Image (tube, grey):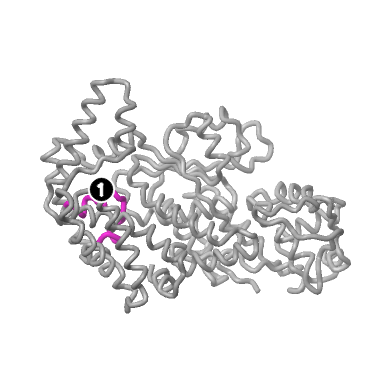
């Protein structure tokens, strides 16, 4: 967070946008506490962010940002406070639409009354308890984030939440305030599915699988990764590499990261979260990172489950859920297994090793047991196989591409399909593969030669004539395959990054 603040102080508008997204729920809650009016609170929030951005360069210490921003919004709210009565309960459009759509009028009346009582009860709490409840339950922030913003200890915040629950339980006559709130606020949708692709998400909706679906968009097998992928320095470094190497716009990536972090903070709004991830390195890296993050969160009553498969009846070579038809996907519904401490521990160990800049940490991962996550070992072995071999200097991707080209497969699309089917455990994508091919044709000692001219395809930049180009091994490439030569660094055999390792 402090890195984003420093970048924003230097005039980086994208860093400031990330900060606004991260803090806007807190700022709104503080403004509403003073004003008791949704629209005025939104006005105070906008004015507070505008003033903060204009005077950010005068902030001496980044760690003081939360308290400084809180002071600004309180001042803005005070100026608007005489324009309305305090504490009109917040009623969201989502709640109104869902309750009005309920066909049973008795249920409508019951839920309207519970909603009115719930918000009135929160509104009647003492100031300190009320703000803590809104930030934790209504806005979904973590204990550490709220404590930093309010400038109190985590233990003091937990005490406030405990006291608030006692008061609310008595006022609402329910055993679990959070369950009552979630039932109203989420419209009865208690399950969240996290998947790795838009196509899979659409198939789930077609299959009628109940619950909300969030798509996690990343490709951790390509480019640099770091132990803490929420750090601003990690996000910005990765954004620069993905834009340069794959053509993914920097702004698009940064916006996606901010949105995914926001979605992840909301998992405690659900009774169950199901992670749908396949067997390959592409998915297992995402799975390990998500489980590591979720394992560090206060999940309370949220159940976390996992559906991870490496095959499906009738599918000869299983790559992804996206290969299945909606009715096939439906058969998997409910077959997920609960995630326990063993899975969290292994996922954290997987990500720590995978993101480490120390090669020995990568090697040591396989020395301990990996049974808790059935595909972790094979995926990590596939990751290590990408590294240059001691026998010929080739990684698994370069070797597979070179051997396919030597067998007479010269069209890029056919090369990609051959390599993907051979290296199923990688989950290799086309953009990554084109980048590997490009490296193998460049440099002073290329492994492949390619006919025609033009650029290699990148994100949202298709090259219509690329499929007409043809690849074949160079003399050096043939010598390496024959065991007569070793791939030098200038051959394009070495990727820049493999997990946390920078190979060049």
Screen quadrant of the C terminus? bottom right
Q: Which of the two residues, 11 or 294, is positioned nearer the viewer here?
A: 11
* Relative vertical location of residue 144 with respect to residue 300 in this rendering, above or below: below
Q: Residue at x 37, y 40 (%)?
A: 272
Q: Is 175 left or right of 428, judged from the image as shown?
A: left
Nearest the viewer among 445 and 252 is 252
Q: Residue at x 15, y 55 (%)?
A: 82
Query: Residue 240 at what x, y percent from top left?
Result: 57, 67
Viewer-nearest residue: 152 or 319: 152
Is residue 351 shown left or right of residue 429? Answer: left
Identified at 53% across, 65% down, the residue is 364
Question: What SS does tag 1 mark?
Answer: helix
Q: Quadrant of residue 242?
A: bottom right
Q: Which residues are magenta?
A: 130-147
How would you classify the magenta stretch by its main secondary structure?
helix
Does 145 lie within the magenta span?
yes
- Crowd rating for badge 1 (residues with CA inside 10 Å; few <14, some 14–19, many 20+): many
């Amino acid at each position: 967070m402090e890195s984003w603040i420093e970048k924003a102080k230097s005039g980086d508008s994208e860093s400031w946008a990330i900060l606004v997204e991260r803090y806007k729920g807190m700022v709104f809650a503080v403004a509403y506490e003073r004003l008791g009016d949704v629209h005025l609170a939104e006005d105070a929030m906008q004015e507070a962010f505008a003033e903060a951005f204009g005077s950010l360069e005068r902030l001496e210490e980044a760690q003081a940002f939360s308290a400084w921003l809180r002071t600004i919004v309180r001042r803005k709210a005070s100026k608007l406070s005489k324009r309305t009565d305090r504490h009109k309960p917040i009623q969201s459009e989502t709640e109104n639409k869902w309750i009005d759509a309920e066909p049973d009028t008795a249920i409508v009346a019951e839920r309207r009354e519970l909603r009115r009582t719930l918000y009135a009860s929160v509104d009647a709490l003492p100031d300190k308890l009320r703000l803590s409840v809104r930030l934790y339950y209504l806005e979904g922030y973590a204990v550490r984030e709220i404590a930093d913003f309010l400038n109190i200890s985590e233990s003091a915040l937990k005490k406030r939440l405990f006291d608030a629950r006692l008061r609310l339980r008595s006022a609402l006559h329910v055993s679990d305030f959070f369950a009552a709130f979630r039932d109203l606020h989420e419209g009865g949708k208690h399950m969240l599915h996290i998947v790795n692709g838009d196509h899979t998400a659409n198939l789930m909706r077609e299959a009628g699988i109940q619950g909300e679906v969030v798509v996690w968009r990343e490709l951790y097998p390509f480019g640099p990764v770091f132990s803490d992928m929420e750090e601003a320095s990690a996000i910005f470094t990765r954004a620069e590499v993905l834009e340069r190497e794959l053509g993914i716009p920097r702004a698009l990536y940064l916006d996606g990261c901010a949105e995914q972090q926001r979605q992840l903070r909301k998992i405690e709004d659900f009774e169950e979260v199901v992670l749908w991830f396949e067997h390959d390195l592409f998915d297992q890296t995402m799975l390990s990172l998500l489980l590591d993050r979720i394992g560090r969160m206060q999940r309370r009553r949220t159940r976390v489950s996992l559906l991870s498969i490496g095959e499906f009846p009738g599918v000869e070579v299983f790559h992804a859920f996206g290969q299945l038809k909606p009715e096939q996907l439906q058969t998997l519904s409910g077959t997920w297994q609960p995630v326990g401490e063993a899975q969290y521990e292994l996922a954290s160990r997987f990500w720590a090793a995978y993101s480490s800049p120390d090669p020995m940490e990568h090697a040591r991962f396989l020395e301990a047991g990996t049974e808790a996550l059935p595909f972790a070992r094979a995926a990590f072995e596939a990751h290590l196989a990408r590294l240059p071999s001691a026998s010929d200097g080739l990684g698994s991707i370069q070797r597979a591409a070179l051997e396919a080209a030597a067998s007479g497969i010269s069209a890029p699309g056919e090369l990609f399909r051959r390599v993907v089917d051979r290296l199923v455990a990688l989950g290799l994508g086309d953009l990554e593969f084109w980048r590997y091919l490009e490296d193998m044709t460049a440099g002073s000692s290329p492994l492949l030669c390619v006919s025609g001219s033009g650029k290699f395809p990148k994100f949202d930049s298709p090259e219509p004539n690329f499929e007409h180009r043809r690849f074949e091994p160079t003399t050096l490439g043939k010598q390496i395959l024959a065991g007569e030569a070793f791939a030098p660094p200038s051959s394009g055999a070495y990727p820049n990054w493999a997990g946390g390792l920078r190979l060049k």
